[in-house]
Image (spheres, grey):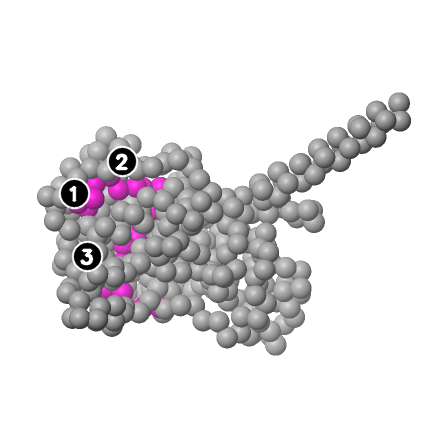
Amino acid sequence: MIGLTRANLIRLVAGAICLLLVLNFLGFRTDGASSTSLSKLSIRRVHKYAHIYGNASRLPAAPLAMSKEREQQMQGGPNTTSTTVIATANFTSIPQDLSRIQLSTHKPLPMGQKTTSALQANCTDPDPRDGGPVTPNTTLESLDVIEAELGPLLRPGGAFQPDKCNPQHHVAIVVPFRDRYAHLSVFLRNIHPFLMKQRIAYRIFIVEQTNGKPFNRAAMMNIGYLEALKLYQWDCFIFHDVDLLPLDDRNLYNCPRQPRHMSVAIDTLNFKLPYRSIFGGVSAMTREHFQAVNGFSNSFFGWGGEDDDMSNRLKHANLFISRYPVNIARYKMLKHQKEKANPKRYENIQNGMSKIEMDGINSIKYAIYSIKEFPTFTWYLAELKNSERKS
């Protein structure tokens, strides 16, 4: 009987250990606090890339919880303006002294740096005769797996530059984000190989909005534009929904002389353009285009309307929307729950023309609470300070 009791006790202890290991893998913390969806996707072991900055005000609800010590420092008052916030999500050895660490800027390599015999030639666009339809990989994997696959090919922060020629296009991929963690891993797994073949220099910026207000997609794109320019003077910006995957590699991610609507034909819309003025999903604009229209409006809280407002802004600035043919500009949309529509979207669109000069990148108010360089993307946690207008 005693031997049986000991055997049961051993089984019980072994079972408890296995349960703790499973909970840790899923991202649950043993201190009683719930972890985040980011950690559930196994965003771990990123201390080598964790260049994190903080804000003097108290952090709102965020996908990464601060350590208690750092949280107390953040609540210490106005004397903590230079405090560095260390976010933890099952990290094992994040360096504590980040005072001298700077977020790596994107600087093209000097011509000829990697060649010993002659200067490198300029990159050319891929020959469309060599391209065609592609099939995306929609298998859900943890970001650890994706980072292991793609990390060695990229620079920290999800940056890439061809090493055999000098890129002629320097592109910032800005992704407005909230609560689409499963989509993020699928998006990164597909978009990086797709872009690497195009001989462009690029970097992926994920701009996540904090909780507390309805999602403002347009404002996150404005923030991504402004923050990306702090690292490099990109000549092209592509604003990209995280749930859209390109289906043809002839769809070049660069910026022509006129703004380009990229996601012309989406599978869930039977690969048809819903209406001619649409500018949502994936769109490309030069730095000059975006400045000419004062960016996106910051007034669209909730789903819908901001892309139509941008279409009106482009028309107002005497710009027109260019597109690839429907057999090239094709996209697959990942499944997701339909979001709550913005009840004021039509009112905002109607009044938008009168607010172009006062509603956009020149009027946005926001705070960046965290910046991190992951191997496959640069992540910003942003709080929008602009208030939703009451009717």
Specify the amino acid type for callout 3. Answer: Cys
* The N terminus lies in quadrant: top right
Specify the amino acid type for callout 1. Answer: Gly
Q: Residue at x 35, y 57 (%)?
A: 154
- Residue, disc 1: 131
Circle on res. 255: 3
User: What element does badge 1 sit on?
Assistant: loop
- Residue, disc 2: 135
Lower position in the chain sequence, tag 3 or tag 2: 2
Among the 4 quarters of the image, the one containing residue 271: top left
Q: Residue at x 23, y 64 (%)?
A: 235
Q: Is residue 95 left or right of residue 333?
A: right
Nearer mark to the viewer, of 3 and 2: 2
Q: Residue at x 49, y 61 (%)?
A: 48
Nearest to the observer: residue 192 or residue 229: 192
The segment highlighted magenta reads 231-251
